[in-house]
């Protein structure tokens, strides 16, 4: 039986929006999509600004509960809707700490201080300006951090936390293709990890939900 939910995701096309669509696909939950795009002006309307004063995507609405920040959305959905066989967030204390460690590391070190710097200064120079020094530092920093992550990950694990796929994998997996698009090398262990996870039906479904044209997220 399909679970009764009243869930809406605002946001499409970007890697951060993909995270919300993917978590819902993994959990098999029905939801609506409001196809709000970044830099389209759609986040700047009065109605959208009431929903999210930051004027950003993605936003999740679960009933009356409004939540922002893609990694937090993934974790919230995992904590609220996980069930046996589809546990996106571990319940055991130290496993959950490890989950939070990977999520925080990926969002801060790989996304915000590395890839998003490149998105701004290389992808959107007309808005943020070119900054060759910031770009070089961000590229070098990403390489250093992903090498360190490869050491921690090791070579015998299927997913970041071991044998079970979790929300931490959703966050990591949404930065790897982004790095590849920017022609930044990722360690072989993460290449194999990427190719393994890319075959998940929920990932494929989420890519379409995030962008019906089938184009890769930006
Ligand atoms: N830390 C936030 C970042 C959200 C964010 O910066 N979203 C961008 C698109 S990826 C956005 O909505 N920018 C506003 C705009 O482009 O209109 C998250 O992970 O959800």
Image (spheres, rainbow, N blue to C red):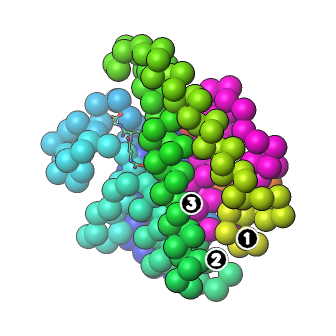
Tell which circle, 1 or 2, labels the residue nearer the N-terminal end: 2
- The main secondary structure of the magenta stretch is helix
Compared to residue 20, the image places residue 57 above or below, namely above
Residue under label 1, please give it.
162
In the picture provided, is 105 more to the left or to the right than 32? right
Q: Nearer the viewer, residue 54 or 35?
A: 54
Return the residue at label 2: 86
Q: Is residue 77 left or right of residue 36?
A: right
- Is 116 situated left or right of 208 in this image? left
Residue 45 sits in which quadrant? top left
Q: CA distance from mark 1 to mark 2?
A: 15 Å
Rendering quadrant holding ligand 1: top left
Give the residues drawn in magenta, as a range: 165-194
Identify which residue is drawn at 79% across, 65% down: 157
Name the residue: 26% across, 42% down.
55
User: In the rendered structure, which disc, 3 or 1, sits on the residue that comes first in sequence?
Assistant: 3
Q: Disc 3 designates what residue?
A: 102
Check disc 1: other Cα within 10 Å, few if <14, some if 14-19, many if 20+. Answer: few
Q: Secondary structure at mark 2?
A: loop
Q: Is residue 111 visible?
A: yes
Q: Quadrant of residue 26?
A: bottom right
Question: Residue 110: x percent and y percent?
Answer: 54, 43
């Amino acid at each position: 039986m399909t679970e009764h939910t009243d869930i809406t995701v605002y946001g499409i096309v970007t890697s951060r929006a993909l995270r919300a669509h993917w978590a819902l696909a993994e959990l098999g939950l029905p939801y609506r999509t409001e196809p709000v795009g970044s830099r389209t002006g759609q986040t700047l309307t009065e109605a959208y600004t009431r929903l999210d004063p930051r004027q950003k995507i993605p936003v999740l609405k679960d009933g009356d509960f409004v939540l922002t920040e893609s990694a937090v959305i993934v974790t919230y959905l995992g904590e609220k809707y996980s069930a046996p066989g589809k546990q996106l967030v571990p319940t055991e204390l130290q496993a959950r700490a490890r989950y939070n460690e990977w999520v925080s590391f990926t969002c801060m070190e790989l996304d915000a201080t590395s890839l998003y710097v490149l998105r701004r200064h290389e992808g959107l120079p007309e808005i943020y300006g070119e900054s060759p020094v910031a770009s070089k530092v961000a590229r070098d920093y990403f390489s250093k951090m992903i090498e360190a992550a490869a050491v921690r990950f090791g070579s015998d694990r299927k997913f970041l936390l071991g044998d079970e796929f979790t929300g931490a994998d959703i966050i990591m997996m949404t930065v790897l293709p982004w790095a590849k698009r920017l022609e930044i090398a990722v360690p072989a262990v993460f290449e194999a990890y990427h190719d393994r996870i890319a075959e998940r039906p929920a990932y494929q479904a989420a890519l379409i939900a995030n962008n019906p044209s089938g184009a890769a997220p930006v």
